[in-house]
Image (cartoon, grey):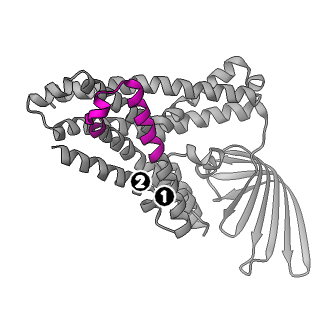
Amino acid sequence: MNRIDRYLVRQIFAMTALVGLVLVSIYTFVVLVTELGQGTGSQLGALGLLRYVALLVPANAYTLLPLVALLGALLGLGGLAHQNELTAIRSAGVSWLRIGWAALMAGAVLGVLGFVLGNVLGPAGQDSAEGLKQGRSGASHVRWLRDGDSVIRLQDLRAADRVAGVTAYRLAPDQRLAAIVTADTAAYVDGAWQLHGVVRTTFSGDRVVVEHLPETTLKGGISPHVLQLFILEDNSLSASGLVRLIDYLRANRLDASKYEMLLWRKLVEPFSVLVMVLLAVPFAAAQRLRESGVGQRLLAGIAIGVLFYVSDKVAVSLGAVYQWSAMLSAATPTVLLGAFASWRLWRMR
């Protein structure tokens, strides 16, 4: 990377950081106002609410990152073009392809940042935020799960290793009800579930046998690593969490297409950020934008971002209707936008 490359990358990073600070601050303020309207402030208190909103900042930044990267690159390179610095760089023998390469390097770094936000910081922050909120509210998370030949209802899923109000319906090979097991509480200890306050009802022909047990041990079953995935919102799951959830659904012969789509979108997202930065190069070089002010460049960037967002939603919807592969539905908008940006750069060479 030579001095000009470093200068271009530095300009893109500087404007991206500025745009990110502004947009994430606005988004976080909107979240704060929304939570106040929903009574979270009285539930958590002022400091608790601020902590809750702060824990959501990485996830908010991840949501906005493609638009932030596009606007940052467009303003950074557009500002250089407006001040004729790009013209001077071009006069020094630097091609548009070389400028595009510098933008690509900046986009790659931002893509890695997006991967970290979406798979490490964001999920961890949202997990802590939901734990803080649910711990104060006392609200229950009712979940229905499948584990082999059993269908399980969890009345109160507040933590991955502690549940209350457990009801398990065990099915016979002919899908008739074979037994019902209820437990007041269950805790995961040393690789097994410890059930307390157990009532086991077994159906055998015309006989019904009811047993009352103070406690019993259930080996195997759904692990806390899987239960944790049902506490978080779907969009808050990391790629590794989605893989575990998909494996669980497939093992129990359940539909995993929704989570396969989320997984592929999570994997494609860093490349979307990279493509957004690359796309800014031909637009920054356009005569009309080069002579325009900051407002017009922002408007152009927002228009491109909205177009990409809509095309992404359309591709996902079409994929669900026509049963396309999750990879194809998730990657098509990014691939098409990347091809368009590359074509524009190639024509400018």
Whichever of labels 2 and 1 marks the residue nearer the N terminus, that label is: 1
For the point 68% across and 22% down, which residue is it?
Answer: 48
Q: Specify the amino acid type for callout 1.
A: Ala
Question: In terms of depth relative to the viewer, which is nearer, 241 or 210?
Answer: 241
- Per the image, the residue denoted by label 2 is 333
Query: Residue 213 vs residue 186: left or right?
Result: right
Give me the disc on residue 315.
1
Query: Residue 320 vs residue 214: left or right?
Result: left
Percent of width and height locating residue 60: 53, 33
For the point 44% across and 27% down, which residue is it?
Answer: 20
Q: Does the magenta stretch include residue 292?
A: yes
Question: In terms of depth relative to the viewer, which is nearer, 213 or 67?
Answer: 67
Q: Residue 85 occupies which quadrant of the picture? A: top left
Label 1 element class: helix
Compared with residue 14, is residue 99 higher up or lower down, i.e. above or below?
below
Q: Is residue 23 visible?
A: yes
Q: Residue 302 occupies which quadrant of the picture? A: top left
Percent of width and height locating residue 130: 66, 36
Give the residues in magenta: 281-308
Give me the disc on residue 246.
none
Our reading of the magenta stretch's main secondary structure is helix
